[in-house]
Image (tube, helix red, strand yellow):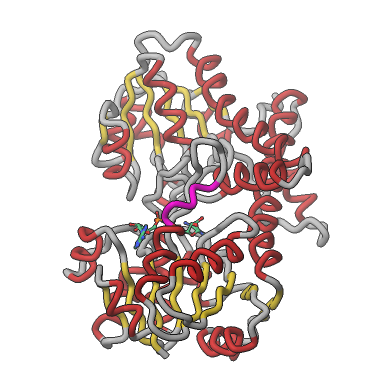
């Protein structure tokens, strides 16, 4: 089986290299020639845990290649995976320009039957639109199918998620396409990973339903944490106790500065618009968006409360990526917070194990440091934004030497209040107020 993956970003590169790891011949195509050059020269364009190994292994084995030449990739492939971006457009709807451009390219270049697999997260009805768009732009009558195959991987653990998925959703009514898709995913089937076979529209909705359920869980515990701050209860104990209920489960019950990343914010906005466009007032999604926006703003409010005023203050930000083990800063709460603090003329230093290059391009005003201790030097407040493992065992005594009066604001509840306070720091976090 030969397949081609269009779009070599966080999803396309993982999908392509993991499918190659299953033993399939995969050619990854991207319109960004710099990215393809890097990959052909053994340089990874993104940081994703474990990805570099799987890419280099499969490239050496000759099963994985990278090109900008879409025609040759399409010619030799039975299935064409679309993994291009669907960012939030100016009107809050998903911007479909990358998907449309790729579909038009496919229509112009394909000469025989293909399965076009939509991996990108797309509004309900997209498969139908793509089918029409491709049909309208074919030179001759060529058969093809469009399968909606949403991706559920999480950045940071994307390789493991793709190789060991909870389920594989296949949206199509074509038996011919289904047979090809089952063959592509055969190794996961052998691992007894369930397939959910449904219509295109349902598959498209499943992706939004999954993300909104997860975003709801995060926002719910954030709301409980905020309430804990007001009433002196401890959100950690609440989360542990409610998580023991099998109907609730312990995952996604960690309060913080709000969800971010390249998916949840844009997907919630897209789902709100899908609902509106279909004459349904989805109140919960609208509230969810509002709650998450407020959660980021609350970080700024708490910083201001802790410092009294922003004037002449220096803040050290630890963690810039939207979550650990990735360099992705798209919609990262840390970036929103940093930008807002810069608007208040706060001096910022920062350290992140992987995301500083990406952040530098966006916020050059920040002083980027070689390690967390340099970043914390003479800070009035240390703001932990991303729960990277290396931040779990910080030597606070060392920080005490260079920033004795600093407030430690732990938005992710990584530390024990007592230990930090014993060193003479003021400590604030999310939903774990001082009981004393
Ligand atoms: N990032 C995630 O964790 C995640 C998880 C599940 C689903 N998704 C969805 O997967 C899709 C891709 O997300 P991503 O984070 O990988 O995006 P990305 O922006 O990192 O990558 C998209 C890539 O597509 C390339 N591209 C765009 N148009 C092209 C074209 N016409 N031909 C060839 N290449 C083209 C871009 O150059 C870029 O490299 C989105 O719809 C996203 O919502 C993302």
Image quadrant where residue 287 sits: top right
The structure residue drawn at horizontal position 44% and vertical position 22%, both measured from the top left corner, is 340
Judged left or right of residue 215, residue 372 is left
Q: In the displayed image of the protein, which residue is found farthest to the front? A: 140
| 291 up-or-down from 391: above or below | above
Residue 104 can be seen, yes or no: yes
* Ligand 1 placement by image quarter: bottom left
Total marks drawn? Answer: 0
**Magenta stretch contains residue 95:** yes
393 or 13, nearer to the observer = 13
| 381 up-or-down from 29: above or below | above
The structure residue drawn at horizontal position 39% and vertical position 87%, both measured from the top left corner, is 2
Q: Horizontal and vertical percent for residue 24?
A: 40, 87
Q: Horizontal and vertical percent for residue 264?
A: 57, 48
138 or 289, nearer to the observer = 138
Q: Horizontal and vertical percent for residue 96?
A: 49, 52
Specify start and end residues of the magenta stretch as a single range.
94-98
Q: Horizontal and vertical percent for residue 156?
A: 45, 59
Image quadrant where residue 188 sits: bottom right
**Magenta stretch contains residue 157:** no
The structure residue drawn at horizontal position 44% and vertical position 47%, both measured from the top left corner, is 393
Q: Quadrant of the C terminus?
A: top right
């Amino acid at each position: 089986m030969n397949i081609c993956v269009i779009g070599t970003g966080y999803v396309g590169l993982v999908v392509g290299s993991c499918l190659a790891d299953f033993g399939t011949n995969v050619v990854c195509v991207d319109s960004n020639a710099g990215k393809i050059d890097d990959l052909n020269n053994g340089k990874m364009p993104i940081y994703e845990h474990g990805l570099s190994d799987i890419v280099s292994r499969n490239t050496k084995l000759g099963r994985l290649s990278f090109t900008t030449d879409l025609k040759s990739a399409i010619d030799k492939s039975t299935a064409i995976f679309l993994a291009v971006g669907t960012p939030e457009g100016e009107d809050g709807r998903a911007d479909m320009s990358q998907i449309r451009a790729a579909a038009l390219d496919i229509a112009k270049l394909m000469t025989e039957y293909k399965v076009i697999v939509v991996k990108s997260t797309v509004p309900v009805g997209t498969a139908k639109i793509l089918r029409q768009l491709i049909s309208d732009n074919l030179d001759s009558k060529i058969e093809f199918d469009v399968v909606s195959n949403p991706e559920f991987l999480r950045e940071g653990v994307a390789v493991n998620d793709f190789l060991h998925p909870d389920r594989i959703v296949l949206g199509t009514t074509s038996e011919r396409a289904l047979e090809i898709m089952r063959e592509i995913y055969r190794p996961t089937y052998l691992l007894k990973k369930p397939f959910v076979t449904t219509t295109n529209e349902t598959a498209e909705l499943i992706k939004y339903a999954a993300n909104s359920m997860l975003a709801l869980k995060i926002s719910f515990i954030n709301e409980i944490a905020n309430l804990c701050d007001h009433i002196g209860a401890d959100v950690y104990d609440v989360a542990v106790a409610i998580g023991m209920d099998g109907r609730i489960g312990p995952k996604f019950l960690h309060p913080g500065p709000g969800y971010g990343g390249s998916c949840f914010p844009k997907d919630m906005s897209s789902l709100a618009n899908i609902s509106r466009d279909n004459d349904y007032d989805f109140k919960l999604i609208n509230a969810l968006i509002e709650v998450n926006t407020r959660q980021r703003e609350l970080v700024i409010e708490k910083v201001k409360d802790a410092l009294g005023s922003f004037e002449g203050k220096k803040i050290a930000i630890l963690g810039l990526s939207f979550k650990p083990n990735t360099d992705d800063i798209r919609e990262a709460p840390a970036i929103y917070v940093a930008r807002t603090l810069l608007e208040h003329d706060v001096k910022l230093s920062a350290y992140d194990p992987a995301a500083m290059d990406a952040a530098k391009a966006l916020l050059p005003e920040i002083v980027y440091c070689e390690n967390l201790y340099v970043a914390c030097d003479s800070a009035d407040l240390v703001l932990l934004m991303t729960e990277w493992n290396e931040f779990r065992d910080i030597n606070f005594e060392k920080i005490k030497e260079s920033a004795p009066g600093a407030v430690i604001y732990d938005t992710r509840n990584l530390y024990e209040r007592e230990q930090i306070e014993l060193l003479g720091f003021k400590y604030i976090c999310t939903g774990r107020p001082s009981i004393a």
